[in-house]
Amino acid sequence: MTARHAVLPSTLGPLTALAEGDALVGLYFPGHTYPFVPGSEGPEVTAGEDPVLAAVATQIGEYLDGVRTDFDVPVRTAGGEFSERVWARLREIPYGTTTTYGEIARELGGPGLAQRVGQAVGHNPISIIVPCHRVVGADGSLTGYAGGLERKRALLALEEPSAEDGARLF
């Protein structure tokens, strides 16, 4: 499959979206802790001329504008078995809620897996759409985010339930 990418403007800074075939395979912020491997992104294309990247641009824009709460862009990840299990679990975290690394570790086999969960969350290749920003520390603190803690804070604030709907996310 031929990889291609587009740089998408956003309120959180430009996002580099990588696609292969009919799926999104990466969505990265500038200065991302674990960026894509240089040379793997393929040629730059105009998002509007590529059906996958156009859908990503539209849906990310709608999400950041507060009118979209989930995504239906096809995604494909290529991690090890444990990472894939973590990333699948991330996709189950509902909009407006958070979970902890420890809770995911318990669900996947035991509290001793929390560090491995943290590593997998940090290496999530598809920011926002695979919502790793919804994972917080055991005490509710904002810990690690490959796109930067200020972006994590902004994403959680965007998803903050109203006072009458529930408690703060962070």
Image: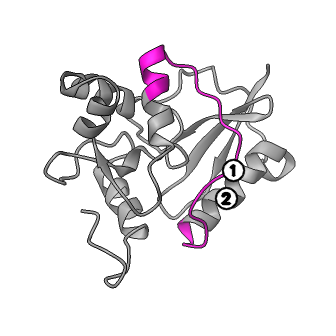
Name which of mark 1 and mark 2 comes first in the sequence.
2
Element on which disc 2 rests = helix
Report the front residue among 130 and 37.
130
From which residue to which does the magenta span run?
A: 64-85
| Crowd tier of the residue under label 1, counting other residues whose Cα lies within 10 Å: few below 14, some 14–19, many 20 or above | few
Q: Residue at x 33, y 43 (%)?
A: 145
Residue 11 vs residue 75: left or right?
left
Residue located beneath label 1 in the image: 72
Q: Quick check: 116 left or right of 85?
A: left
Residue 124 appears in the picture as rendered: no
Q: Is residue 156 visible?
A: yes
Write down the residue under mark 2: 59
**How far from the left and from the top, in percent, is residue 77?**
59, 26
Q: Is residue 76 magenta?
A: yes
Q: Position of residue 100 (x, y in %)?
A: 26, 44
Identify which residue is drawn at 37% across, 33% down. 121
User: Does the magenta portion include 164?
Assistant: no
- Camera-near label (1 vs 2) is 1
Q: Is residue 141 above or below residue 91?
A: below
* Quadrant of the drawing holding the C terminus: bottom left
Q: How many marks?
A: 2
Q: Residue furthest top?
A: 80
Horizontal side, residue 36 vs residue 90: left or right: right
Asked if the residue under mark 2 is in contact with the one under mark 1, i.e. CB atoms within 8 Å, the reply is yes
Say left or right for 170 vs 164.
Answer: left
